Image (cartoon, rainbow, N blue to C red):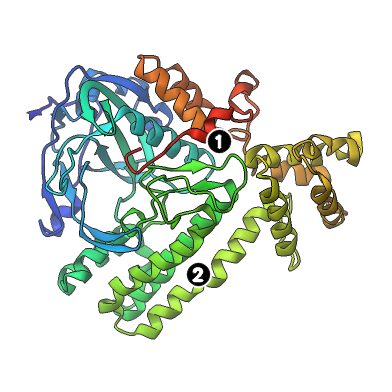
C-alpha cells in the first residue's frame, strides 16, 4: 500500500481511538483497486468540511479509492458485536469499512470512513468489498436523508472500478466515503459487555461521552452519568424513528450493530421509501419473518435500546435506573410521531385529539395502499389553494388518488374542522416544508444503477441535486416525482444491496 505525497488540501488527521488501544480496533491498510474513477462527488459536503471545489483531484481519488494512504492517516477497523434479526451473533466488526481518522472541520470533528476498501480482520467470510449497485444506493440515500433533515451519516464521494466482485452475480467494485461525527454503534458497547470486559466497556463509554456528549461530563462519573447517556440515546432514537415513520422510510436491517449511538441513520442496505402506504411492508426480502416491517420499526428500536441498556448495566449497576431511562421511549416516541405527522397536516401545535385524526387518516391510506409521498404533497397543495379555488376543487387531486373515495370523504370534514381558524397559507407553508416532493424511490435507484453500469452517471447527479432540496419544485425534474412504474413492485432488495 502506497503512502501519498502531501495533498494540497491539508488533511490533519487525528486518531482518538489510539488513546483506547488495540482492544477496540485493528490497524489495516485498504486494498487497492484498478482503473478507479469518480462516480459522484459531493461538493456541498466538501465545502462544509472546509475543502475547496478542486479538492477532488487525482490524488484525492487515489486516497478515497483506498489506493493510497494520506500522510498521517492511520486506517483502522473497529470491533463490535450485536443481535442480528433478534439473535445474538457474537463478534462482528467493520468487515468492509475502514476509518481513515478524524478531521477537525468547520462542521466540527468528523470521522472519515471508506466502505468497500477491502478485507479487515472482521470480514469473516466476506471479501471486504462493496459493489457499484449498493454503493450508489448508500450514496444517494444518505444525502437524501440529510436533505429531509433526518440525522444520518453523510456521503462525500463515490469511486468506481471495473474490478469484479461476486454477489448474487458478478458485479463491479466501488468505494463510498462516509462522514459522521462518530460511527459508534450499540454493538460496540455490547461487544465488551458480552465478554465481561467492564474496564474496556467503561473506557469506551467514557470516550463516547467525552467526544460526543460533552454536556454529560458535568454529571458525577457514576451511575448518574451513564444513566443520563442511556436516556439521551433513547431520546435521540425515538426522535429518529418518528422521522423515519413520518417520511415512510424503511431501514430493512435494524440489527443492534446497525444502530447509531448518536441517533443517526446508519448502514444503508435494503432500505426503501414507501410507494403505496402499507404498514406491513417488508423492504428486505431476506427478512422472512417480517421483523423489520415498516410498522414494527418503533417496537424494534425499543427492543434494541433494551439491549443497549443491558450492555450499560455493568456501569449503571441499578437495573431500575436503567429501565426508567429506557421507559421514556414509550412516551417520547408517540408524542414525537404525533408531532411529525401533525406538521404533515399543517398543525404546528398538537392537540389531544390529533392522534385520532392522524391514525384514522393512516387507516384510510392503508386501505388502498395510497401512494404515500404523492398523497402528502397533493394535500399540501390542496390546503394552499383552498382560498383561491374553494375546498372541493382544491382537494379534487387528492380525492383522485382513491379508487373508493368514501373513506377519504368521510375523513376530510374532521380535518377541515381542525384547521378552521388556522391561516391556510401558513399551514400550507408548513406542509410544503415537511412533505417532500422528491424521495429516493427504489425504481429511481434502479434506473440510476442501470445507467451507471453503462458508465453514465447523469441520473446519479440529477438525483443528488433534487434530493439535496427535496421540498423545492425543481420544474426540470418533474419526471422524478411521479408515480412508480408497474415494474417497481418487483424490485428485490436484500442484505447485500
Judge whether residue 339 can be spotted in this image.
yes
Q: Position of residue 489 (x, y in %)?
A: 53, 35
Is residue 46 depicted above or below 223 in this figure?
above
Q: Secondary structure at mark 1?
A: loop
Return the residue at label 1: 439
Q: Residue furthest top?
A: 455
Q: Is 456 in front, or is 492?
A: 492
Q: Are there few (<14), some (14-19), or many (20+) residues within 10 Å of tag 1?
A: many
Q: Earlier in the sequence, mark 1 or mark 2?
A: 2
Describe residue 197's horizontal placement relative to residue 56 as left or right. Answer: left
Q: Residue at x 9, y 29 (%)?
A: 3
The Cα atoms of the two marked residues, 1 and 2, are separated by 28 Å
Is residue 241 depicted above or below 206 in this figure?
above
Q: Residue at x 73, y 51 (%)?
A: 364
Judge whether residue 440 can be spotted in this image.
no
Q: Are marks 1 and 2 in contact (CB under 8 Å)?
A: no
Q: Quadrant of residue 159?
A: top left
Q: Position of residue 168 (x, y in %)?
A: 29, 33
Q: Is 102 in front, or is 264?
A: 264
Return the residue at label 2: 329
Q: Is 361 in front, or is 352?
A: 361
Q: Position of residue 89 (x, y in %)?
A: 24, 60
Q: Residue at x 45, y 27 (%)?
A: 446
Q: Residue at x 28, y 23 (%)?
A: 160
Q: Are there few (<14), some (14-19), or many (20+) residues within 10 Å of tag 2?
A: many
**Which part of the image, by quadrant, shows the C terminus?**
top left
Q: Quadrant of residue 257?
A: bottom left
Q: Secondary structure at mark 2?
A: helix
Q: Quadrant of residue 357?
A: bottom right
Is residue 85 depicted above or below 451 in this figure?
below
Describe residue 421's horizontal placement relative to residue 123 as left or right. Answer: right
Amino acid at each position: 500500500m502506497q503512502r501519498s505525497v502531501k495533498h494540497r488540501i491539508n488533511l490533519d488527521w487525528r486518531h482518538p481511538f489510539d488513546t483506547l488501544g488495540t482492544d477496540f480496533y485493528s490497524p489495516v491498510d485498504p486494498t487497492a483497486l484498478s482503473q478507479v474513477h469518480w462516480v459522484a462527488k459531493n461538493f456541498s459536503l466538501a465545502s462544509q468540511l472546509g475543502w475547496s471545489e478542486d479538492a477532488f483531484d487525482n490524488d484525492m481519488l487515489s486516497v478515497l479509492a483506498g489506493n493510497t494512504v494520506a500522510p498521517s492517516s492511520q486506517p483502522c477497523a473497529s470491533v463490535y458485536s450485536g443481535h442480528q434479526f433478534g439473535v445474538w451473533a457474537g463478534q462482528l466488526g467493520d468487515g468492509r469499512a475502514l476509518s481513515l481518522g478524524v478531521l477537525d472541520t468547520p462542521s466540527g470533528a468528523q470521522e472519515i470512513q471508506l466502505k468497500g476498501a477491502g478485507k479487515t480482520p472482521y470480514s469473516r467470510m466476506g471479501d471486504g468489498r462493496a459493489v457499484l449497485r449498493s454503493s450508489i444506493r448508500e450514496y444517494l440515500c444518505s444525502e437524501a436523508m440529510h436533505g429531509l433533515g433526518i440525522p444520518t451519516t453523510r456521503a462525500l464521494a463515490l469511486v468506481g472500478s471495473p474490478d469484479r466482485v461476486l454477489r448474487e452475480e458478478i458485479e463491479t467494485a466501488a468505494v463510498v466515503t462516509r462522514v459522521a461525527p462518530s460511527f459508534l454503534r450499540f454493538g460496540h458497547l455490547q461487544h465488551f459487555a458480552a465478554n465481561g470486559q467492564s474496564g474496556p466497556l467503561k473506557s469506551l463509554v467514557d470516550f463516547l461521552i467525552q467526544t460526543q456528549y460533552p454536556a454529560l461530563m458535568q454529571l458525577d462519573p457514576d451511575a448518574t452519568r451513564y444513566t443520563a447517556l442511556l436516556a439521551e440515546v433513547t431520546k435521540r432514537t425515538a426522535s429518529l424513528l418518528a422521522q423515519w415513520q413520518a417520511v415512510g422510510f424503511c431501514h430493512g436491517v435494524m440489527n443492534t450493530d446497525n444502530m447509531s449511538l448518536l441517533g443517526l441513520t446508519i448502514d444503508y442496505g435494503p432500505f426503501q421509501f414507501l410507494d403505496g402506504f402499507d404498514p406491513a411492508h417488508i423492504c428486505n426480502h431476506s427478512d422472512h419473518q417480517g421483523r423489520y416491517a415498516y410498522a414494527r420499526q418503533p417496537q424494534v428500536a425499543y427492543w434494541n435500546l433494551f439491549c443497549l441498556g443491558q450492555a450499560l448495566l455493568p456501569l449503571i449497576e441499578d437495573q431500575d435506573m436503567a429501565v426508567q431511562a429506557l421507559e421514556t421511549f414509550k412516551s417520547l416516541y408517540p408524542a414525537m410521531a404525533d408531532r411529525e405527522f401533525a406538521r404533515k397536516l399543517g398543525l404546528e401545535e398538537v392537540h389531544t385529539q390529533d392522534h385520532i385524526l392522524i391514525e384514522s387518516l393512516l387507516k384510510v391510506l392503508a386501505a388502498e395502499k395510497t401512494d404515500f409521498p404523492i398523497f402528502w404533497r397533493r394535500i399540501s397543495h390542496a390546503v394552499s389553494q383552498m382560498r383561491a379555488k374553494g375546498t372541493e376543487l382544491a382537494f379534487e387531486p387528492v380525492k383522485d388518488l382513491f379508487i373508493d373515495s368514501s373513506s377519504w370523504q368521510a375523513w376530510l370534514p374532521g380535518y377541515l374542522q381542525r384547521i378552521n381558524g388556522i391561516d391556510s397559507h401558513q399551514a400550507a407553508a408548513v406542509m410544503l416544508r415537511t412533505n417532500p416532493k422528491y424521495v429516493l424511490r427504489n425504481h429511481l435507484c434502479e434506473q440510476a444503477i442501470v445507467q451507471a453500469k453503462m458508465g453514465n452517471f447523469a441520473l446519479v447527479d440529477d438525483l443528488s441535486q433534487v434530493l439535496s432540496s427535496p421540498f423545492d419544485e425543481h420544474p426540470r425534474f418533474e419526471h422524478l416525482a411521479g408515480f412508480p412504474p408497474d415494474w417497481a413492485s418487483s424490485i428485490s432488495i436484500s442484505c447485500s444491496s
